[in-house]
Image: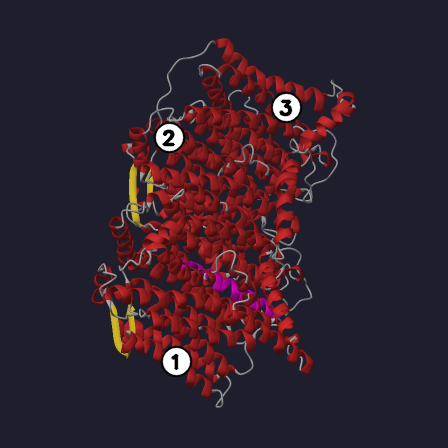
Amino acid sequence: MILVNLILILLVGGVIAWISERQHPNLPRWIALLVILFDLGYLCAVADLSWSQIAVVPNPSDATTWLFHYKAEWIPRFGISFELAMDGLSLLMVVLTLVLGAISVSSSWTDIKQRTGFFEANLLWTLAGVIGVFLALDLFLFFLFWEVMLVPMYLMIAIWGHEGRSYASMKFFIFTQVSGLMMLFAILALVVLNQHSTGVYSFSYFDLLGHNVGGDIAYWLMLGFFIAFFVKLPGFPVHTWLPDAHTQAPTAGSVILAGILLKTGAYGLIRFVVPLFPNEAMAFSPIALALGAVGVIYGAILAFGQDDFKRMVAYSSVSHMGFVLLGVFAWNTLALQGAVMQMIAHGLSTAALFMIAGSLQERLHTRDMSKMGGLWQNMPRMGAVAMFFMLASVGLPGLGNFVAEFMVLIGLFKVAPWVAVVSALVLIVGAIYLLIMMQRAFQGKPNEGLRLSDYGGREMLTMAVMIVGLVWLGLYPQPVLDTAQPVLDSLTRLVVEVSEAASTTDIAGAFP
Amino acid sequence: MLKLLPLIPLFPLVSSIILMVTLGKLPKRMVAILGAGSVGMAALITLLVGLAFMETGQPHHQVLWTWMRVGEFSPDIAFYLDGLTLVMMSVITGVGFLIHLFSTEFMEDDNSFSRYFAYLNMFVFAMLILVMADNLLLLYLGWEGVGACSYLLVGFWYQNPDNGAAARKAFVVTRIGDTAMAVGLFLLFTELGTLDIQPLAEAAKSQWEVGDTLPVVACLLLLGGAVGKSAQLPLHTWLPDAMAGPTPVSALIHAATMVTAGVYLIARTHELFLLAPPAMLAVALVGLITSLMAAFTALNQHDIKRILAYSTISQIGYMFLALGVGAWAAGIFHLVTHAFFKALLFLAAGAVIHCLHHEHNIFKMGGLRTRLPVVFWSFLIGSAALAALPLTSGFFSKDMILLQAYELPGVGPWLWVGGLLGALLTAMYSFRLVFVVFFGETKMEPDKQPGVRMAVPLSLLCVLALVGGFFALPLVPLASAFPVASEHHPSHLIEGISIAVPLIGLAIAYFIFLGGQWKVDGLVNSASGQMLRKFWFSGWAMDWLYDKFWVQPYKSLTHLLRRECMDDIYNTIVKFCQLLYRVFSYTQAGRLRWYATSMVFGMIVVIALLQGVI
């Protein structure tokens, strides 16, 4: 029930926040913040996890070895059940979701002035949907959460977004919807094929795992899943919804979008694509790695060309999330750990950059960097904070992003050295656009006449949380690594077992 | 005592964090005490640790915690202390403290006094981590950390966009080298399974033979990192521009410590380089060519700091030459003496600039000998050591390098000749600087005199620059870290030539720039002379070349792509859908005749189908 409660608290909290607006327009903000913190506290207190529990290597296809498992019948005729489960990987993702959720409430504290109740409700419902995605292990339920989380997000962009919001929200919705459709086809086909071989319908992850469909059809099914997650990641060349959605979304929307929603795509790749279709995924990996490397570099190049602060950060997401794709398809523990670390570190650093963009827009009423300059003089605190997160995004060692990218690259180098070398070029092109961002916004000649309020206590506190988080991830990432390690171990082992069984496909030959 | 080791980087780190968190709210006096005091404490503890280390001479290894551990990839936050580390730490904390002290007066009037010391302390911390790291990943942390601090300090006066550009150039150009180094680390880890420096060397020696391809590739990648950080060809272009930062920063980062990190890296991994003779030769050639090119350029500059910057590039070239010929101890020895005299020169130059209304052009100065006596003597001693006049510290180290280069079988004598030419040029440009700035007629009156917090560091560095060479100190512990070079002395003639060449250079500089016996105007003003001067002045047109072949193409590329051409594909799909919509809506326009006709046609087609006509 713990897992169900995690989602229920957010859903109900959203309703309360919506209603409370009638009492006082400020009330929904407090309620949203408290609900998220309560949820986080609930997870920590009730879950009562110890390291020895986490260290147990779960058997991916045996639900009882997971940290938590909940299953209730739903539509037994088709083998659909309400099945949630949590292991180390989903634990990390849920914690990240809740932390960034609290941060996004804080980031929109003064930004959203109209219909705060409905806004906070949408925010909480998005979080509920995302947590559902991270926990659902019945494919039907997973698909349901996958689609449901889009609706409140769509509303956040469409109602509280900026000037081009209707185009952006529509584009966001269509891209994710179409790719979701492919996944639905793949899920249905998988279940039907499984029924042919076993005789029963089941949407349960645990039943479907390890039953290799085989043949060409499996490759197409893998692609169906892959495309859905790949669009969400976002991968080159289906990333184009992201710059528009990010740019037009309100600050809290951007934080959630970049910090959490993109991670559902990455999570799906790790949880579903490779474990369900190990051979096919490995056969596909040269293409995926190439797409990842292109995305990493392409995102960085396009980020350099932008004038819009938020658009630039959005392209930097395309670049950074490419590392997740690389890490997943390199498929060794080192690279996978790097991918997981990147999900968390990128969540924090990008959320902070979007918050800075949002604060700038709130104060200057523009996102155009060509109209900024010398803002350090006016707002030294914001300048210093921006400098920190800029350096974190550049991949300065000692901060989380470095640990992530270095582990991905060193793991990738083992299987595909040249892809690693090309991707490493982002150390250079990435530095170029981030340094120029700092120059255009915060350095250069200050506008003396400008009176701007610097960061206050609430903003500094929010930023401090993320700064401490990144330094911690950068200098002592071991707790995170230890949490993810058993899961990743079991998943890599699964692939090895399956590929050994299917000796007809030569995995090693799939790599360049 | 040795257990105190982690305290050494901790002091500047804590001070830096305090200064960052307080955001300039502390009074200046407090900032100065924190900033300079923390580095002073670090220097003191270094002394204690050094004494304790000398007693045994055994390398000391101290693990603080496991940084990250995934399978066999398990770098620690751990320190390794041996002779080489100790020498580097002494230079960083010792010279660093003097420069911090100097800064408290130099930066007194600056509004961002606290921010300055926050960055400078952070730099000292990162630099200490770089030299103390026991594994290459932690070394890389220090390596990138000093790069970031260098970026922050070069662009310290951010209001001027030119400074920002210089800072970005410094960061990006060194990042190119860093990327090569990172790939080197990937390769080393993949092949040898560890990044800890000592086990790495052992593994390399057992797995690789001298002359294998892999060690050559790995060493060349490491060399890539080294040439970036140490401003050697072809990545040297950032250093002259980096002079945009405050002058004490140039003294600490861009002369004494950070730019010599490349030398340290190669010396630290010398056991790998010994397995890769072609990489060693590359190191030597890069060093020699860089030192000559930079010396020619230095001869043609008129900005006092740029002259010193090119001189730094040239001197680091000597250190690379030393490393390349296997004279490890000589290279590190030169690193130390260079830290003394180049820090002295930069601080003295800073004093000149400070006292002379921020003037940088040496031809607007003159006759300062009597006006700023302390600075004059500092400059004279520094230049003498730089030119390697006999008995100064620079003489011993440079002599050692040249002699060991000469002894290298094969190309040795050629390297020696090149090195001598460099020595001649060094003497010429350094005394050109002294003669033009401090002799002749006074063109500008200084408006203040350096105070005691400037004079003390200058005098102490004077002493070090003069007699630093007599200290056997750096060489005793060093011997434990490096293979001992064979003891045998070349002929007196070779040694005599080495001594004479700098004196000849001094004489030439005297005849041209002070005595006026030699008139070179005709030569200089001729068409070809002008062209050559311009070419050298621009630093062999390297900046132009890079701008033409890298910067501009990259800018055009981003400009071309910025409008997201991928969207064109999706827009085409949208257009197609809209087209279909228009076509189909046209058929439902509500006109009866249309409907009747299409129904008839439809029926005909259906009937035809049923009859099997089609």
Circle 3: element type: helix
Any magenta on residue A353?
Answer: yes
Relative image position of residue B159 (x, y in whole percent): 64, 54
Which-is-in-front pick, marks 2 and 3? 2
Query: Is residue B283 positioned above or below B138 on the image?
Result: above
Our reading of the magenta stretch's main secondary structure is helix
Q: Residue at x 55, y 54 (%)?
A: A434
Q: Which residues are magenta?
A: A343-363
Query: Is residue B111 positioned above or below B550 on the image?
Result: below
**Residue B272, which numbered label?**
2
Which-is-in-front pick, marks 3 and 1? 1
Write down the residue under mark 1. Answer: A11
Relative image position of residue A194 (x, y in whole percent): 29, 65
- For badge 2, the amino acid type reads Leu
> Of B291 and A276, which appears nearest the observer?
A276
Quadrant location of residue B48?
top left
Q: Chain of mark 3?
A: B
Q: Chain of mark 1?
A: A
Q: Mark 2 or mark 3: name the one nearer the start of the chain.
A: 2
Residue count near mark 2 (Cα–Cα under 10 Å), binned few <14, some 14–19, many ≥20: many
Write down the residue under mark 3. Answer: B428
